[in-house]
Amino acid sequence: MGKKKLKPVIEGDWLIGPNPTPLDPEVQGPLKPGEFRGGQEVVDHHIWQDAEGNWRLSNKQPQGVFFFSKSARLTRIAYSPYDFTITRENRTRVGTVREASPQSSASTRRSTMARPVTLFTGQFADLPLATLAEKAASWGYDGLELACWGDHMELDKASQDADYCKKQKATLEKNGLEMWCISNHLGGQLVCDPNDDARTDAFAPASCAGDAERKRQWAIDSMKNAAHAAKNLGLEVVAGFTGSPIWHMLYSFPPVPEDMIDAGFERFAELWNPILDVFDECGVRFALEVHPTEIAFDIITARRALDAIDNREAFGFNYDPSHLLWQMMDPVAFLREFPDRIYHVHMKDSALQLNGRTSILSSHLDFGRRDRGWDFRSLGHGDVKFEEIIRELNRMDYQGPLSVEWEDSGMDREHGAAEACAFVKKVDFKPSAIKFDAAFED
């Protein structure tokens, strides 16, 4: 005979099962009005928070445990004896009711939840952070990867002002969001680029416009500030670009002597080693997004970049499969080549559009044009095989966030961002803790 599930009933703003059994306040301690961030009132003691900040719930059935962040802002909860759902501001998590232990460690909490899904804010930098944080929470994201432009993260302030850092984090926490990484792509690009045309003038202050070396010095300072900002924010990773002094030499005509390429990697090391010294001082790592126009854009150049800086630990990679796929590489091969250097992961899709007429070099056509040989797509609408990526990340034991970098010129960005979050949560899964055939053994 199957186990009967209790049907939740609606009571006020909360969904609660019939006949809830409050926990003994002297044993577990009741939640008091206002203990939920945002001042949500407590309906019954059967919703409670332990000493480590884990949300728990119980009724007459075995106690269930839902691990959420200590700053979680719950709006309603539903449960049956065997399954439960907690919804927070249109964000839903489903879990299985299990026997609760009196306490749990951080590693236990990590093992009970999938990797966090964050949104890179670079493509939304026109929106105030407060507005974007509210939207991202409603779309289902667990956190934001703040871009260091717009009002999302001002490095000159964050590198020196602890109160500014608290304010930016509070904006996220107000919406139940967290932060694992900040990104300084625009500043990083100018460190190694020739900077000899107007395309990058907008990346730096107006006082640097038209002056290649002033842009470069500003960029170097910006990257050092990013390390200090990350430290002040309590983060361990900054993602971004390096630029490249030799990208314009990609096609070997006029002929490019090997010593010119050698000199390019030496220049990269000359400029970046002092920056990485600051990252080391701050206990922060830099994750280069391997990407055309950077010193590393594929497996071979990534290996060469590491060799150029003597494989120092402060330098690793922000893995983004979309850029590898359109170069007609296997994105999983990159993970297998650098399993110990994947410091951050971007979830991003792209599609090849080669039809015998279109070119992989894109014909000087902007994104979204029909005659391009490839284009970025919203997650799940391109050619990247994300399941294989998730399986390899599991083999590597990557525990960091999966950060959506949303780009698709043919789709509304808010629709796409919400859809992408749901896609990542669906495609991600934890590895098995046991062999599937373990039950066959004595």
Image (cartoon, helix red, strand yellow):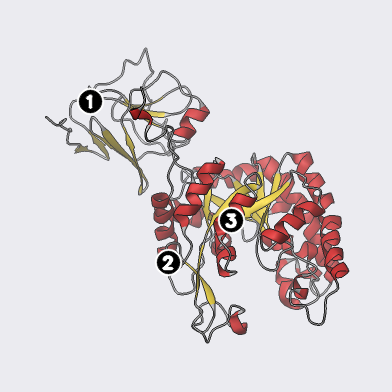
Among the two numbered marks 1 and 3 on one chain, the one whose residue lies closer to the N terminus:
1
Q: Residue at x 75, y 50 (%)?
A: 225
Give amino acid for label 3. Ala
Q: Position of residue 367 (x, y in %)?
A: 55, 77
140 up-or-down from 42: above or below? below
The residue tagged 2 is 381
Residue 334's quadrant in the figure?
Answer: bottom right
Left or right of residue 313, residue 60 in this image:
left
Among the two numbered marks 2 and 3 on one chain, the one whose residue lies closer to the N terminus:
3
**Residue 333, which numbered label?**
3
**Residue 240, which numbered label?**
none
Which circle, 2 or 1, is nearer the viewer? 2
Q: CA distance from mark 2 to mark 3?
A: 21 Å
Q: CA distance from mark 1 to mark 3?
A: 52 Å
Q: Position of residue 435 (x, y in %)?
A: 41, 34
Q: Position of residue 251 (x, y in %)?
A: 74, 77
Q: CA distance from mark 2 to mark 1?
A: 45 Å
